[in-house]
Amino acid sequence: MHVDSNSKEPILIYPYFRDTLLALLKNDPAFPPDERPKIMRGVGEAIQELHSRDWVHTDIKPDNVLVNWTCDNEGNKIVTDVALGDFDIACQLKDNEARHTEHALGNAMWRSPEAQTGICTKASDIYSLGLVYIYILGGGDLLVLHDYQELLKAGIPPEQEVITKHFCYFGPVPESLYEQIKDENWRTALRGAAKMAEAEVQERPMLRLETWGQQLGEAAVDLLSKTTSLDPKSRSTIDQVLALPFWQDPGS
């Protein structure tokens, strides 16, 4: 939240943060593993505050997570503060109902499958949070697209590439997802992406979360699977996420 303002300009003044999460891990891929759960928890608590007031952020991604850190006497980086920013497309839901938009909100790389179709819910925020958690835990290469222009030249929408990747990681796709998509064209597109994903996984079964996530530990896989479920109705709420065993022992 802003800490000062100038109504004549008009200007809002916000606290200064040293890094975005995106810049922090890009510049220091070896950022201390023991400090990363602090960032994860801070983002989760920010979303908990929003959702408790029936607001959804709709654009949760690493460059919207702000991190302050310092160094101890031995030069080790220590997280001191975490905040979630950029609320320009946040919206308040009435009676916890889904918001349907003509155009998808937020960044294509960090959207849930249903959000790609223009559906906005608290569950969509939870999915994006799960992707940010994967990024924090070192899985950025799985999520970040570096070849946007090449995809477009090849006639492949970035959204299609993202959805197919996610279906590989978090599939198989449940029928319940399609049932929640009203647009026939989108249902057809999602089924096509699911078919491509299953063919890919048959050749490369290591693409599934339960396989590559083993190196993160059982508690982390449990956290990620509950936030990135492809069925929006089966995703954990933010209160449930913050009550998971992961937070007692992130390395287990």
Image (tube, rainbow, N blue to C red):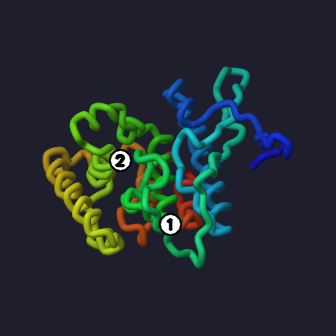
Q: Could you tell me residue 140's position as x and y percent?
A: 42, 37
Q: Position of residue 227 (x, y in %)?
A: 45, 59
Secondary structure beneath dot 1 equals loop
The residue positioned 59% from the left and 78% from the top of the image is 95
> Which residue matches tag 1?
121
Query: Residue 214: which numbered mark, if any?
Result: 2
**Residue 212 placement: quadrant:** top left
The type of residue carrying mark 1 is: Thr
Percent of width and height locating residue 127: 45, 57
Nearer the observer, 7 or 115: 7
Q: Earlier in the sequence, mark 2 or mark 1?
A: 1
Q: Is the residue 27 above or below the residue 119 in the image?
A: above
Where 174 sits versus 88, above or below?
below
Residue type at numbered disc 2: Gln
Q: Residue, x 26% and y 69% (percent of image)?
A: 184
- Percent of width and height locating residue 188: 22, 64
Name the secondary structure under disc 2. helix
Cα distance, mark 2 to mark 1? Answer: 30 Å
- Callout 2: few (<14), some (14-19), or many (20+) C-alpha neighbours within 10 Å? few
Q: How many marks?
A: 2
